[in-house]
Amino acid sequence: MSAGTIYGLGLGPGDPELMTVRADRLLRQARHVAFFRKAGRKGQARQIVEGMIPEGAVEYPMEYPVTTEIPLTDPRYNSLLSAFYEESTAHLRALAAGGEDVVVLCEGDPFFYGSFMHLYTRLVDHVPVEVVPAISGMSAAWTATGSPITWGDDILTVLMGTLPEEVLAERMAASDAVVVMKIGRNIDKVRRALRRAGRHDSAWLIEYAAMPRQTVQRLAEAPEKVTPYFSIIVVHGQGRRP
Ligand SMILES: C[S@@+](CC[C@H](N)C(=O)[O-])C[C@H]1O[C@@H](n2cnc3c(N)ncnc32)[C@H](O)[C@@H]1O
């Protein structure tokens, strides 16, 4: 019996109409559908494909043992997550070994700061794995602002809000266009870094880009509160143009 294939299925930023034709086709013929979710939640990737999973398909939710409950620097964080990825990989490998294809739903692009990468590296030497690329959340975020992100030879830097303030400020000051992801409880630090870099007043905050609850506002006008998990800050480049 030939092995099944594990598909890392990029679904785009939220609106199902922004999925690729390939992702749509693979999903509609799927018999096994795996996806990540926080315990007690539906899971954003699963939410995107609501009503699109074929009847009779077997769903396999992979629940993170921890998300923001303990700090990233705590040694338990890595060991808990690594055990979780090993267990999830073993399940997917067993299905593939039995000849079954599995689609793993991924919000945005699977190879762009996504959890699927941790399965991919554990699977790729053992079973056939294919990745279907997709529109990332940041693309939907700058599109929602109604202004282009980069012009001419602008340098775009993508930063995670989890980085130290010093690094954020330095990179923000040295770039033409900036995207900041993973903001949430890091918002105050990100704001301070933007101010130090002189970019705070030109920054935009986009929450839930391409999702039903999408909001777009100037960061300077946004309430000073923790932002949702799905939020992105964008500073547009102002590079050369005819
Ligand atoms: C683990 S990363 C996943 C990125 C995803 N693979 C992608 O291609 O966009 C999660 C972070 O991406 C950002 N993000 C992804 N999609 C988003 C969306 N539709 N709206 C707002 N933020 C989004 C948020 O900053 C969030 O904290």
Image: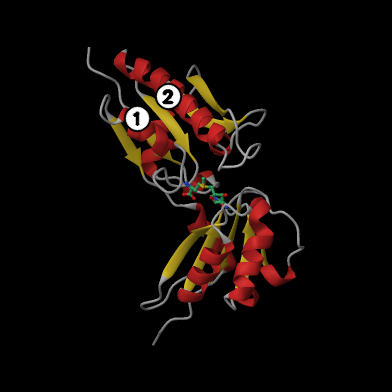
Task: Residue type at mark 2: give it.
Answer: Glu
> Mark 2 = which residue?
86
Location of residue 212 in the rendering, given as x and y in whole percent from the top left corner: 65, 49
Q: Is residue 89 left or right of residue 42?
A: left
| Viewport quadrant of the N terminus | top left
Q: Is disc 1 placed on a helix, strand or loop?
A: helix
- Expressed as whole percent of the image width and height from the top left, the position of residue 232 reads 58, 58
Residue occupying the point 47% across, 38% down: 115
Q: Which mark is residue 71?
A: none
Q: Give the image location of residue 65, x and y in percent.
A: 58, 28
Q: Quadrant of residue 183?
A: bottom right
Tell me which corner region of the image, top left, top right, bottom left or bottom right, holds residue 156. Answer: bottom left
Say whether residue 59 is left or right of residue 228. left
The image shows residue 167, relative to residue 53, as above or below, that is below
In this view, the residue in front, 94 or 173, is: 173
**Which of marks 2 and 1 precedes in the sequence?**
2
Residue to which mark 1 is pinned:
122
Residue 121 on image: x %, y %: 34, 34
**Residue pictured at 59% horizontal, 78% vertical:** 198
What residue sits 53% from the left and 28% below the top? Answer: 80
Which residue sits furthest bottom?
242
Kindly check if marks 1 and 2 are in contact, taking CB atoms under 8 A apart as contact. Answer: yes
Disc 2 on helix, strand or loop? helix
Whether residue 29 is visible to the viewer of this picture, yes or no, is: no
Query: Could you tell me the amino acid type at mark 1?
Result: Arg
